[in-house]
Amino acid sequence: MLQYNIRGENLEVTDSIKEYVEKKVSKLERYFDTPPSSEVHVNLSVYNDEQTIEVTIPMKNLLLRAEEHNTDLYAAIDLVVDKLERQIRKHKTKVNRKFRQEGAPKHVFAELEREAQQYQTQTIDDEFDVDIVKTKRFDLKPMDSEEAALQMDMLGHNFFVFTNADTDETNIVYKRRDGRYGLIET
């Protein structure tokens, strides 16, 4: 059963908004054999007449996250749920494909992992002041690099930090300019 943590920024979260969010997000439960028992984090905000909704659903082997902006809050809620639904369908398709290929001699990402041994680091010139405007904290879930790449794609990010299930080390997968993937081992 999903638990909801709904917060508003520059916006009062009324009972009707809360009920609408819960009604829409709870429809995602139909994609799971057993409903996930996790807390749904919903952040609603208003800036200059633009409504923003950010929904995060941390689960055992998957982190669902989507954000939408719209002048109409209810439309933004609908759009963010559609986006989450697409992520779930995409993840289920890729997981099913992965299990079908499990016996195959080569996995898709094996070559990418070898290439990832070489990577470049960027240094920040001492003359620049670094102004950190946001801090995010999250649990690193053990997974393999292929799973991490899938998770990164589902979130729409360019990189993803994870704990490598084989080595128990913190690793980073990233999307290269050529569209392929890289792996950084710490």
Image (cartoon, grey):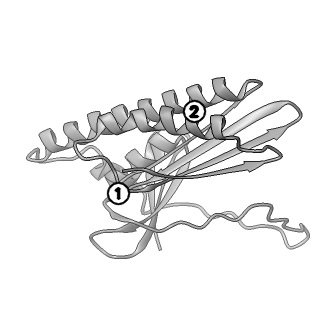
Residue at 84%, 67% in the rendered image: 130
The count of marks equals 2
Residue at 35%, 68% in the rendered image: 164
Q: Amino acid at mark 1?
A: Ser
184 vs 174: above or below: below
- Mark 2 element type: helix
Q: Is 127 situated left or right of 100 in this image?
A: right
Q: Position of residue 95 (x, y in %)?
A: 25, 42
145 vs 43: above or below: below
Quadrant position of residue 20: top right
- Mark 1 element type: helix
State the residue in front, 59 or 182.
59
| Residue 145: assigned label | 1
State the residue in front, 44 or 108.
44
Question: For the residue carrying disc 1, how many other residues have a C-alpha within 10 Å: few (<14), some (14-19), or many (20+)?
Answer: many
State the residue in front, 29 or 14.
14
Q: Position of residue 147 (x, y in %)?
A: 33, 52
- Distance CA(mark 2)–CA(mark 1): 37 Å
Q: Earlier in the sequence, mark 2 or mark 1?
A: 2
Residue that carries the numbered disc 2 in the rendered image: 20
Q: Is 83 situated left or right of 168 in this image?
A: right
Q: Amino acid at mark 2?
A: Tyr
* Residue reaching furthest to the left: 103
Q: Position of residue 37 (x, y in %)?
A: 36, 56
